[in-house]
Image (spheres, grey):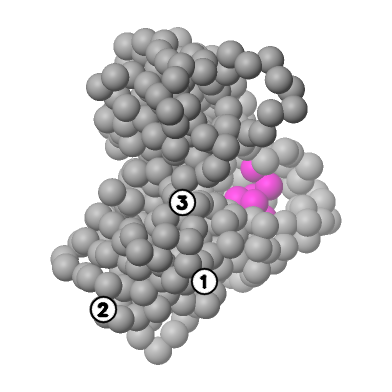
Amino acid sequence: MNKSQTVFVGLSGGVDSSVAALRLIKQGYSVVGVFIKVWHPDFMICNWEAERLDAMRVAAHLDIPFLTCDAEEQYRDDVAEYFIEEYRAGRTPNPDVMCNQYVKFGAFMQFAKDKGADFIATGHYAQRIEAELGAEMHRGVDTNKDQTYFLWTLSKEQLEYSLFPVGDTPKDEIRKEAEAAGIPTAQKKDSQGVCFLGQVDIPEFLSHYIDLVPGAVLNTKGEIVGQHKGAQVYTAGQRHGFTLSTTDTKRPAMFIIKTDLNKNTITVDTNKPEVTNQSDLVLDKVILRRQVSVGDKLEVQVRHRQTPFAATVSKLEGTTMLLTPDQTEELTAVGQSCVLYVGEECLGGGILS
């Protein structure tokens, strides 16, 4: 690569993006720090000003230009509204995936292109590997921090325009590197949860947009055993967030195995819901960065940090794919991401339907 090229780095105010910028400077790129301003609801206190200030401090320390990309509209329309509407429909969304698709590698990428940047870069723990047929996305070397699960929607074109400078290094080494360079965010804690929720829990947030009505928790016999806050906010496999009438502290954990929006009930059992090798996983909105064929055996991940399991491609038509698991696995909620791998390479994925 031509080291005189310009890279716009998404500076969040955290340590990972700060070191990403530092490394690119050392590699000879012309680096510009960019804070991405996103939407938050009026009824919540947001600390974006403090985050932007941290990002500005990093840019000043690294002596690089600093810009702000206003992505409020895209965040509201493509992340927050998606989040609300998916819950309203009884599906479980993954806002981090949509934030990457529409904001960081959507609005921010377009912002960078419009200003003549050759690449964008982020602090994601993923690796861009140059291969014979172009760039491939591989897992970050830090298995606990690997973020390829949240980046599956990137097209081949988006990946070619993107750099991931910290993906080849464990997180603890990144912090040490930041400290050695005197970066002011070196010891800053990682952000947690959905960005626009802050400290508000999901039912509280959704109650401002969806009419949540408390209802009955049922056992597998149809008997009422507790109460929930509104069937829309619950996910298959969830074990918290509802109240059971029993006071037995030694009872086994109860998992949600079914939600019924029409009756406003959830059903729980001591066994987690499962999908067997007799049941296909149906994926919609599939995005693939290289060719996959019927009969191919892939590694599948339906939750972040989950141990991948093997599945065979049993059907592939347009943007729809059917996968047959090789073994029984815990059922994952409709609406979640199903990400596809071959070894360390992330091929893409789809939405479970």
Q: Is residue 331 visible?
A: yes
| Main secondary-structure element of the magenta-colored stretch | helix
Secondary structure of the residue carrying tag 2 is loop
Residue 337 in the image: above or below residue 165? above
Residue 86 in the image: above or below residue 275? above
Q: Residue furthest left?
A: 318
Decide whether residue 277 is among the magenta residues: no
Which percent across, then down, holds residue 88? 30, 25
Q: Earlier in the sequence, mark 3 or mark 1?
A: 1
- Is the residue under label 1 in contact with that under label 2 (CB below 8 Å)? no
Using residue 137 as the reference point, say whether residue 90 is left or right of it: left
Q: Quadrant of residue 270?
A: top right
Q: Residues within 10 Å of mark 3 (few under 14, many from 20)?
A: some
Q: Marks 3 and 1: which is nearer the front?
A: 3
Q: Nearer the viewer, residue 22 or 47?
A: 47
Q: At x 34% / y 60%, what residue is drawn? A: 279
Q: At x 16% / y 68%, what residue is drawn? A: 317
Q: Which residue is mark 2?
A: 294
Q: Residues within 10 Å of mark 2 (few under 14, many from 20)?
A: some
Segment colored magenta: 14-23
Which percent across, then down, holds residue 29? 54, 66
Decide whether residue 16 is among the magenta residues: yes
Q: Label 3 vs label 1: CA separation?
A: 29 Å
Q: At x 42% / y 55%, what residue is drawn? A: 275
Q: Earlier in the sequence, mark 2 or mark 3?
A: 3
Q: Nearer the viewer, residue 352 or 199?
A: 352
The amino acid sitting under disc 3 is Glu
Q: Which residue is mark 1?
A: 138
Q: Quadrant of residue 91?
A: top left
